[in-house]
């Protein structure tokens, strides 16, 4: 499927284009268009249809993000840049992924897996076994009692070494288990691990401020390891 797609690589650094072109060649991709600035990319889009664009940000005349804002109904976009500072704005524009240079082949393949899922949604649905519905609550053992906590009430969960604190707007419950254990019980579309010490409810985030999110007045850090995935989920 990937080798049948039409690709465009937009970057003012020829060596950066060479790297991505080499990676695509390993996937037997044949239809690759090279553009060294946004104006070339604009003209190329007038000539043919593309399925995926690898788009650099820092370019002369017109930045990648400025170019993207001018394109009506753009194809799938993967940002490639040496700067991490544009991640929030990139995901606001609904890009598929955000690759920081130098791009390694394993990281490139992870991005291409996302493209494959988008290209074959019907088949993916057929192949995946139907999962049981996720319960809308948890039972936490607190002081020898089991307390029912509605998932919709959870603001965030904080690691306290061998314990975790489950914070709701009304209560703060402490139970004996690890943050990893309790996070695995939560639906991934509603909760996200953002730091070694925190898992958050995505719909409770009121503000994204640099490397932190604000939930009910508490600033919770986002680690570099989790940043891109968290921003993708928040903007989706």
Image (tube, helix red, strand yellow):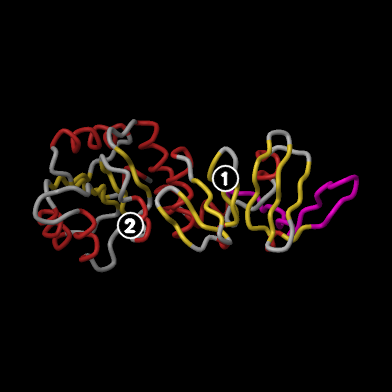
Magenta-colored stretch includes residue 132: yes
Residue 120, numbered circle: none
Residue with the mark numbered 1: 193
**Magenta-tinted stretch:** 127-148
Where is residue 105 drawn, in percent x and y?
34, 31
Whether residue 124 is situated above or below residue 176 in the rendered picture: below
In the image, farthest residue toward the right = 144
Q: Secondary structure at mark 2?
A: helix
| Front-lying residue, 81 or 110 | 81
Magenta-colored stretch includes residue 226: no
Q: Residue at image x 90%, y 45%? A: 144
Whether residue 203 is situated above or below residue 188 in the rendered picture: below
Q: CA distance from mark 1 to mark 2?
A: 21 Å
Q: Residue at image x 20%, y 66%? A: 70
Q: Is residue 159 left or right of residue 12?
A: right
Q: Residue at image x 48%, y 41%? A: 223
Q: Is residue 34 left or right of residue 143?
A: left
Q: Secondary structure at mark 1?
A: strand
| Front-lying residue, 73 or 231 | 231
Where is residue 152 drawn, in percent x and y?
68, 63
Where is residue 132 drawn, in percent x and y?
72, 54
In the image, farthest residue toward the front = 217
Residue with the mark numbered 2: 89
Q: Is residue 141 left or right of residue 203?
A: right
Determine crowd level at label 2: few under 14, some 14-19, many 20+ residues with C-alpha closer than 10 A: few
Determine crowd level at label 1: few under 14, some 14-19, many 20+ residues with C-alpha closer than 10 A: many
Nearer the N terminus, badge 1 or badge 2? 2
Where is residue 65 drawn, in percent x and y?
24, 57
Q: Residue at image x 70%, y 51%? A: 166
């Amino acid at each position: 499927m990937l080798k049948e797609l039409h690709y465009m690589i937009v970057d003012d650094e020829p060596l950066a284009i060479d790297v991505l072109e080499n990676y695509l060649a390993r996937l037997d991709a044949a239809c690759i268009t090279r553009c060294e600035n946004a104006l070339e990319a604009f003209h190329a889009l007038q000539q043919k249809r593309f399925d995926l664009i690898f788009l650099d940000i820092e370019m002369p005349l017109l930045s990648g993000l400025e170019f993207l804002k001018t394109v009506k109904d753009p194809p799938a976009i993967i940002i490639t840049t040496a700067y991490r500072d544009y991640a929030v704005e990139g995901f606001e524009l609904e890009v598929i992924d955000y690759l920081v240079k130098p791009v390694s082949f394993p990281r490139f393949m992870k991005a291409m897996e996302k493209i494959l899922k988008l290209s074959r949604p019907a088949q993916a649905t057929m192949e995946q076994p139907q999962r049981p519905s996720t319960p809308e609550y948890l039972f936490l053992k607190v002081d020898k009692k089991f307390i029912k906590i509605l998932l919709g009430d959870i603001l965030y969960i904080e690691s306290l070494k061998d314990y975790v604190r489950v914070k709701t707007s009304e209560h703060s419950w402490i139970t004996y288990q690890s943050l990893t254990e309790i996070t695995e019980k939560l639906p991934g579309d509603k909760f996200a691990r953002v730091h070694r010490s925190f898992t958050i409810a995505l719909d409770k985030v009121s503000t994204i401020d640099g490397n932190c999110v604000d939930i009910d007045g508490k600033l919770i850090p986002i680690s570099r390891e989790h940043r891109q995935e968290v921003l993708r989920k928040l903007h989706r």
